[in-house]
């Protein structure tokens, strides 16, 4: 017996209505990125496994348990489906020497893969738009990246997304804090869960990032990294805050915001909504000045963020902002052999004039075809039968308003349809 095949758990088909919504979103995103002068880059979906181990850090959720890693059976290479985009982007920047003589403001978008427990807002294949900058020491660029988020929410008609920021300082400062943190958690070892105990001596900062509510209190009382920052780090953080204040952008300083990846320093930030349940972070990022060098490049300051496309789309839907699926301008119905040939010519002619035309295929009565025309959402039907084919004309029928149909020469069709579309637009 044939077994029905299904998509891999946590990896979703995006069906046509939904995919149209994605495309509109992508258009908005593209315009938004262009308005800040960012340029696209596209990296492979598969990268060498050591890239992620080195970039993200061995003792992180992603590397410990979420990566789709496999051995290429043809050559024995260790490969991984990218769980995020920064590592691959940095690899590409180093490999092609992109940051040697100039600064870079880059973006990419596409699927990422993490073996997590699927739930609303958390999938195994999900999509990110990532933005990365290279060669800029900030704090102006940190603030620009944050302000970009605010503009995108406005462009998408979203409100109520709260900005959380923190500073992770520099590695030496984190080291001093780390010692204090370990001492604190050791004093309260009985309150830690298994994950936290295991991380106590490998990556105690990560305990602060735990999603276990039972750890809330012990994390709340933990020594705060910000109290260990030196003057330079504090000045950087203050610089970011000043630009945000100048722009009138409210923010929350969240000392528990440490991010799930190891490569960050100084500024980190997240955009959070309370309207998506537990998966409320729609965008997250920060500065990662050490990563380029850590991956074998010349020391290059860098800063970026990634936004979760599924979560943002869910938020738009939740806010009632999902647009109607786009409809064609014209549905072209026809019957008879001569009419079919004429219909093809007319359809191409209308497309030449910039109209979107759905050409009926598969025969059937005019009645049945006009029912399809109605269902297509097109405002206009063009109808061609034997008589019309014989004298080079077509019937034009307005589907969204009263009034019969009019017979027109095919050469006059496009102008009449465009005129109708403009009138209908103005009435709205
Ligand atoms: P979370 O804390 O929700 O697990 P994260 O810190 O692991 O998020 P990042 O690696 O910073 O997430 O990724 C940036 C953004 O990508 C997140 O803020 C979120 O919007 C989105 N994202 C991350 N993991 C998933 C997933 N499994 N499914 C859908 N979106 C995701
Ligand atoms: Mg995660």
Image (tube, grey):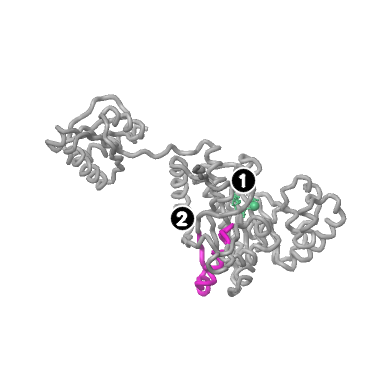
Along the line of sight, the residue nearer the viewer: 300 or 7: 7
Residue 137 visible to the viewer:
no
Q: Is residue 258 left or right of residue 337?
A: right
Asked whether the beta carbons under mark 1 and mark 2 sit within 8 Å of each other, the answer is: no
CA distance separating discs 1 and 2: 35 Å
Q: Residues within 10 Å of mark 1 (few under 14, many from 20)?
A: some
Q: Could you tell me residue 233's position as x and y percent?
A: 70, 64
Circle 2 residue? 35
Q: Which residues are magenta?
A: 80-107
Residue 168: which quarter of the image? bottom right
| Location of the C terminus (image quadrant) | top left
Circle 1 or circle 2, nearest the eye: 1
Q: Could you tell me residue 103's position as x and y percent?
A: 52, 68
Dot 1 or dot 2: first in sequence order is 2
Residue 201: which quarter of the image? bottom right
- Label 2, ligand 1: CB separation under 8 Å: no
Circle 1 residue? 118
Q: Is residue 2 above or below residue 93?
A: above
């Amino acid at each position: 017996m044939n077994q029905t095949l299904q998509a891999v758990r946590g990896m979703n088909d995006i069906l046509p209505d939904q995919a149209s919504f994605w495309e509109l979103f992508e258009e908005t995103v593209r315009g938004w990125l262009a308005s800040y002068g960012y340029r696209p880059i596209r990296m492979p979906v598969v990268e060498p496994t050591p890239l992620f181990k080195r970039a993200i850090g061995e003792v992180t959720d992603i590397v410990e348990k979420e990566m789709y890693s496999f051995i290429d059976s043809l050559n024995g290479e260790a490969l991984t489906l990218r769980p995020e985009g920064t590592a691959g982007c940095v690899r590409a920047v180093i490999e092609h020497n992109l940051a040697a003589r100039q600064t870079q403001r880059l973006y990419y978008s596409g699927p990422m893969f993490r073996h997590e427990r699927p739930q609303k807002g958390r999938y195994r294949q999900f999509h990110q738009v990532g933005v990365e900058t290279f060669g800029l020491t900030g704090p102006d660029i940190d603030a620009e990246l944050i302000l970009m988020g605010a503009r995108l929410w406005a462009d998408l008609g979203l409100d109520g997304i709260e900005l959380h920021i923190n500073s992770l300082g520099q590695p030496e400062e984190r080291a001093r804090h780390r010692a204090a943190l370990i001492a604190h958690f050791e004093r309260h070892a009985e309150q830690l869960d298994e994950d936290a105990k295991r991380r106590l001596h490998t990556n105690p900062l990560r305990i602060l990032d735990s999603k276990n509510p039972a750890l809330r209190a012990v994390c709340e009382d933990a020594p705060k990294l910000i109290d260990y920052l030196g003057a330079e780090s504090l000045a950087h953080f203050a610089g970011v805050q000043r630009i945000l204040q100048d722009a009138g952008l409210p923010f929350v300083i969240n000392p528990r915001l440490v991010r799930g990846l190891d490569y960050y320093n100084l500024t980190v930030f997240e955009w959070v909504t309370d309207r998506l349940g537990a998966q409320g972070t729609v965008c997250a990022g920060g500065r990662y000045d050490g990563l380029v060098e850590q991956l074998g490049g010349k020391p290059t300051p860098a800063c970026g963020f990634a936004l979760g496309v599924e979560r943002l789309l869910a938020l738009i839907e939740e806010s009632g902002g999902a647009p109607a699926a786009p409809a064609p301008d014209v549905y072209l119905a026809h019957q008879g052999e001569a009419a079919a040939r004429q219909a093809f010519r007319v359809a191409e002619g209308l497309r030449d004039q910039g109209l979107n035309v759905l050409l009926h295929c598969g025969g059937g009565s005019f009645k049945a075809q006009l029912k399809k025309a109605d269902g297509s959402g097109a405002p206009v039907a063009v109808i061609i039968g034997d008589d019309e084919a014989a004298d080079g004309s077509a019937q034009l029928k307005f589907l969204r308003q009263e009034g019969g149909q009019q017979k027109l020469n095919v050469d006059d069709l496009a102008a009449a349809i465009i005129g109708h579309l403009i009138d209908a637009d103005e009435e709205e």
